[in-house]
Image (tube, rainbow, N blue to C red):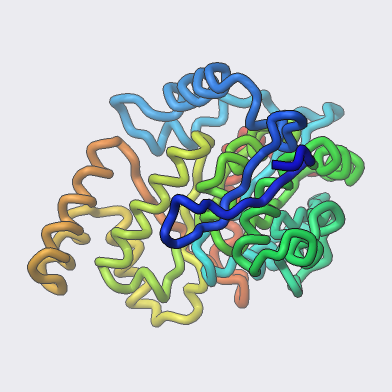
Amino acid sequence: MVAVDLILSVRTDCPENRTTTCISPAKPRFSFLHREGVALREQYRLSHESCIDESSATEKLLHPNQYKPHRKGVTNMPIAFIIGTAGSGKSLFTAALSEWLKMSKQDVAVVNLDPGALKLPYSPDVDVRNYVDVGDLMEKYSLGPNGALILAADLIADEIDNITRDIEAANADVVLVDTPGQMELFAFRASGPYIVNELTKEPKAIVYLFDSVFSINPLNYVSNMFLSAAVYNRFFQPQIHLLSKCDLLPEKEVEKITDWAANLRALEESIEQKLKGTKRLFSINMMQAISKLGMKFLLIPVSAKTNQGLTNFNTTLERILTGGEKYTF
């Protein structure tokens, strides 16, 4: 094996010849992977204990006192990470929210963290594509689109100092981070939690989007509950849940989904009525398991097209990030 910063090799012991990323022991590329895992796990444990206990998890997640207060004259740049499944409307919501905040005289900066984005509905103040280019990775390492995206997601971690510097240079009062379209590239790679923890030291929150069109079926809704719980388990940050693209559904359907979020009994009744056999049993057991963790998924219906729900969402976000105060005075 040639000792270079980053080496891609094909495993010959695997019948599928899966392409894997190998790090040269002579000069490791991903410095974050070589830090002490014990310290990181301890950080997660402390964060976990501060957010979940035997009482209501939601109240803990929304408790503003775990963060330093936002005071006039004190530099503070809280960050909201927009996360959701592919097609849930992350970029459009980021664009709509940033414009809405600007109309409210709030100083906001937008960060694009998707290295594979071809076109964005907003002009990012900080763009990860300035540091990691998927096209160059495909050509340099003979990768397909998916392999290049996976590699790019990890390479972003090594640019964390540069990205943090760019965010601080934006000198905004609140930062919106649009995460990669494929959620697993950010939430379920080792680099994801590292980026969230190391991207400045300001107060942070995760905003998880439930795709309303996908969630209209109780089976899919429970699957989204599971994904949201998995995201929380990865980051251990305060987490807000939104029902995105609600303008695409009749008001009655939106109310039904939000009722599932507020009343597990209503969700269980829908599961009993619409699902059968293994699907019904699996959905009920998964719903009950998540409920036993003390997690709740109260949904705020929002629309990037009509700006519906942005006031309610922003009020919740302000409560988490600034103790209820405006980002910009």
Instruction: Residue at 68%, 26% (x, y): give it.
Output: 69
- Residue 202 makes an appearance in the image: no
In the image, residue 316 lies at what x, y percent? Answer: 55, 46
Q: Is residue 145 left or right of residue 98?
A: left
Instruction: Please name whichever residue, 54 or 167, is drawn nearer the observer in this view of the structure.
Output: 167
Most extreme residue toward the right, as rendered? 169
Instruction: Residue at 73%, 59% (x, y): give it.
Output: 141
Reply above or below: 169 against 216: above
Q: Which quadrant does the C terminus fall into?
A: top right
- Indicate the quadrant where residue 143 lies: bottom right
Q: Which quadrant does the N terminus fall into?
A: top right
- Indicate the quadrant where residue 93 lies: bottom right
Instruction: Please name whichever residue, 160 or 82, is drawn nearer the observer in this view of the structure.
Output: 160
Number of disc labels: 0
- Indicate the quadrant where residue 271 lies: bottom left
Instruction: Please name whichever residue, 63 or 234, is drawn nearer the observer in this view of the structure.
Output: 234
Instruction: Residue at 60%, 65% (x, y): give it.
Output: 146
Instruction: Please name whichever residue, 251 or 240, is drawn nearer the observer in this view of the structure.
Output: 240
Q: Is residue 25 left or right of residue 277?
A: right
Most extreme residue toward the left, as rendered? 277
In the image, residue 219 lies at what x, y percent? Answer: 25, 66
Reply above or below: 308 against 113: below
In the image, residue 181 lies at what x, y percent? Answer: 60, 64
Instruction: Residue at 44%, 27% (x, y): give it.
Output: 48
Reply above or below: 242 against 236: below
- Residue 298 makes an appearance in the image: yes
Q: Is residue 46 left or right of residue 216?
A: right
In the image, residue 321 lies at what x, y percent? Answer: 63, 37
